[in-house]
């Protein structure tokens, strides 16, 4: 949910947020800014200040224009909207690259911290840069637009019917027929085969752009957005993964054993990798859809949230209203009227749209919206909270300077709504009338509740990591286009311990079947978010004086937590992220110990279950 700072492909990050960028002023600034500075001998701090002010004004104006074009395309994909998005994408990339290059003239100067910070944001904030060579931004925009719309309009014909991703995903979630699962899993991956050449060319252009800006490559540039040198950030990520990996290994072991029992050796072996199509999710990134297969039989809640939502007559709109109520219960303002008028909450029947959920900030003020194809189920109930988290963050930091209107880092942005959704406990469900008081399960259901949560939150971690591990390898040239698919399959095996149901064909481009690859949304943010949301939850529960187990704590209605939480959000990206983290949690480090504590009782259960099994797959 990054604010789209810069650049066409960066604008596509709007997938998870909105965009920024004007163009009327673009040409004027392009000529005026450098020549004004060149005329003087050496730039002064006042020049740097003027440069940043002008850049912020330009980006703000271009941003609103671009955001509205992007919104129109994302909610109505057709030849013309793609055409417009390519145009505006190229213009914004050109402007963003020009401004990023403009920061070079101030390099080595002793600038006030705030100014130096804005220079760094301007320089590293383009997701997919282009070099300033004539035509490069246009070519890049054509490629990224085609990748994006190929994904969003993808279908696969199954049993004589053309199915979209939502329909195919529902089959993966619900079917327990291994043959059907393999067909649908493989079928969706047909849509990404034609993306491979475009992707490879896009990587070449982006790397040229990154190098022009002084980065080693695009991976180096992405990792430069965390207030520390890129290499240090990469080590931080490894440190966090080492903390949480033992939990994943135990979960994997238990799930593999249960799948083996259900499907038999011919479908799922008792050792080695898990078959990727058996895990209830198109990308095997979150596994709670197979709770019925792998959840503890005896100890779990007696209700199922999806069934409850259906029984109580929830509509997609009602789900969003209930999510908003969570924020307002903490003392935050209701969403503006325009949110309800302008959001896309369900899939339109008459046109192609980008269904992958996103939250948008169109004008850097109050025009915030979500775009979803919401279904009434537990997964989307979580997702509406996730998206509103982005919108509430965007609104909280709207009074910051333009370049500071962003998350403290991108993991913060992803963590806000999920952090609140961790408070969707049985007692919260009772508070909102979804279950009766008598249905609140006692402690004997804890294993089931935790297992359900782990199937989403722990299962996700290695996926959250491997997506950008793959992209870093690609950007660094360590993985060539011929090796794209094999490298992806290998990382899935290495980190997630999963494998495709059948051998993948030579022309497969499986990475393209996951939204964020054709959509160019960096993915490390989600790995960070899945660790940090538990840090936020623990800090908030402590603040509220909660003394029970973390998974039973809900901060619904807690205004004190709301005030402190909003204060962190209001900071936006104005300070290095450890300052923001400290403001809310009292600690300056990302840390896996909160997620470990949360799942501690489950870890004990999993180890007991796995006793005598030979876990692991390497
Ligand atoms: O893309 C998203 C959000 C929008 S930022 C719906 N998520 C990741 C995904 O779907 O792959 C949230 C969890 C991970
Ligand atoms: Zn998000």
Image (cartoon, helix red, strand yellow):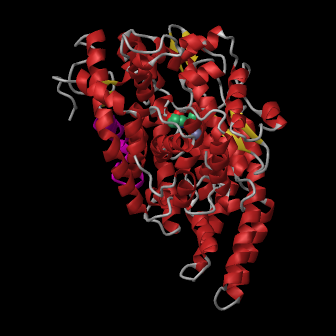
User: Does the segment drawn in magenta span residue 495?
Assistant: yes
Q: Nearer the viewer, residue 19 or 189?
A: 19
Judge from the rendering whether residue 228 lies leftward or rightward of residue 505; answer left or right. right
Q: Residue at x 31, y 22 (%)?
A: 255
Q: Is residue 55 visible?
A: yes
Q: Position of residue 546 (x, y in %)?
A: 52, 37
Q: Nearer the viewer, residue 363 or 82?
A: 363
With respect to residue 382, does 160 lie above or below?
above
Which residues fall within the magenta stretch?
Answer: 475-496
Judge from the rendering whether residue 301 lies leftward or rightward of residue 503; answer left or right. right
Judge from the rendering whether residue 260 lies leftward or rightward of residue 24; answer left or right. left
Image quadrant for the N terminus?
Answer: top right
Q: Position of residue 285 (x, y in %)?
A: 43, 31
Q: Is residue 515 visible?
A: no
| Magenta region, main secondary structure | helix
User: Does the segment drawn in magenta span residue 378?
Assistant: no
Q: Nearer the viewer, residue 197 or 100?
A: 100
With respect to residue 247, does 259 lie above or below?
above
Q: Residue at x 46, y 39 (%)?
A: 196
Q: Position of residue 607 (x, y in %)?
A: 25, 27
Q: Residue at x 59, y 69 (%)?
A: 117
Q: Quadrant of residue 260?
A: top left
- Residue pushed farthest bottom? 41
């Amino acid at each position: 949910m990054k604010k789209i700072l810069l650049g066409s492909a960066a604008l596509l990050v709007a997938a998870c947020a909105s965009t920024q960028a004007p163009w009327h002023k673009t040409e004027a600034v392009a000529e005026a800014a450098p020549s004004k500075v060149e005329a003087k001998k050496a730039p002064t701090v006042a020049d740097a200040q003027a440069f940043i002010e002008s850049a912020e004004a330009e980006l703000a104006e271009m941003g609103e224009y671009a955001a509205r074009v992007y919104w129109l395309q994302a909610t109505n994909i057709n030849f013309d909207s793609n055409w417009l998005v390519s145009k505006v994408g190229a213009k914004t990339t050109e402007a963003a690259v020009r401004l990023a290059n403009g920061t070079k003239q101030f390099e080595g100067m002793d600038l006030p911290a705030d100014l130096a910070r804005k220079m760094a944001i301007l320089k590293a904030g383009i997701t997919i840069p282009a070099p300033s060579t004539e035509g490069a931004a246009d070519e890049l925009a054509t490629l990224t637009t085609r990748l994006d719309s190929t994904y969003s309009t993808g279908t696969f014909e199954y049993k004589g019917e053309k199915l979209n991703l939502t329909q195919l995903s529902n089959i993966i979630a619900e079917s327990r027929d291994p043959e059907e699962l393999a067909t649908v899993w493989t079928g969706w991956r047909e849509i990404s085969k034609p993306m491979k050449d475009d992707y490879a060319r896009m990587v070449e252009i982006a790397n040229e752009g990154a190098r022009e800006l002084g980065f080693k490559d695009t991976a180096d540039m992405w990792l430069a957005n965390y207030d520390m040198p890129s290499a240090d950030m990469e080590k931080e990520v490894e440190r966090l993964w080492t903390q949480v990996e033992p939990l994943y290994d135990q979960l994997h072991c238990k799930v593999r054993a249960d799948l083996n029992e259900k499907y038999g050796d011919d479908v799922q072996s008792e050792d080695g990798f898990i078959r990727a199509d058996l895990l209830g999710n198109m990308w095997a990134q979150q596994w709670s859809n197979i709770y019925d297969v792998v959840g503890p039989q005896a100890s779990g809640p007696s209700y199922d949230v999806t069934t409850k939502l259906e029984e109580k007559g929830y509509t997609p709109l009602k789900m969003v209203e209930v999510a908003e109520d969570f924020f307002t219960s903490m003392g935050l303002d209701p969403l503006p009227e325009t949110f309800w008028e302008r959001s896309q909450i369900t899939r339109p029947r008459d046109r192609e749209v980008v269904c992958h959920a996103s939250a948008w900030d169109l004008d850097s003020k109050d025009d915030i919206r979500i775009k979803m194809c919401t279904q009434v189920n537990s997964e989307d109930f979580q997702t509406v909270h996730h998206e509103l988290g982005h919108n509430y963050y965007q609104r909280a930091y709207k009074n910051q300077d333009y370049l500071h209107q962003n998350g403290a880092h991108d993991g913060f942005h992803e963590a806000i709504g999920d952090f609140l959704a961790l408070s969707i406990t049985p007692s919260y469900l009772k508070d909102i009338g979804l279950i009766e008081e008598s249905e609140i399960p006692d402690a004997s259901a804890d294993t089931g509740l935790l297992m359900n949560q782990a199937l989403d939150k722990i299962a996700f971690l290695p996926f959250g990591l491997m997506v950008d591990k793959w992209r870093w390898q690609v950007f660094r040239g360590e993985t060539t286009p011929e090796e794209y698919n094999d490298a992806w399959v290998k990382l899935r095996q290495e980190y997630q311990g999963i494998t495709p149901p059948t051998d993948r064909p030579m022309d497969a481009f499986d990475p393209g079947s996951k939204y964020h690859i054709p959509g160019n949304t960096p993915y490390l943010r989600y790995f960070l978010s899945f660790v940090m949301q538990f840090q936020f939850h623990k800090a908030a529960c402590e603040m509220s004086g909660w003394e029970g187990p973390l998974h039973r704590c809900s901060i619904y209605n807690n205004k004190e937590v709301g005030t402190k939480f909003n204060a962190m959000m209001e900071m936006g990206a104005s300070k290095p992220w450890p300052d923001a983290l400290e403001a809310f949690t009292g600690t300056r480090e990302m840390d896996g110990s909160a997620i470990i504590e949360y799942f501690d009782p489950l870890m004990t259960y999993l180890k007991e279950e796995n006793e005598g099994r030979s876990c692991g797959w390497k």
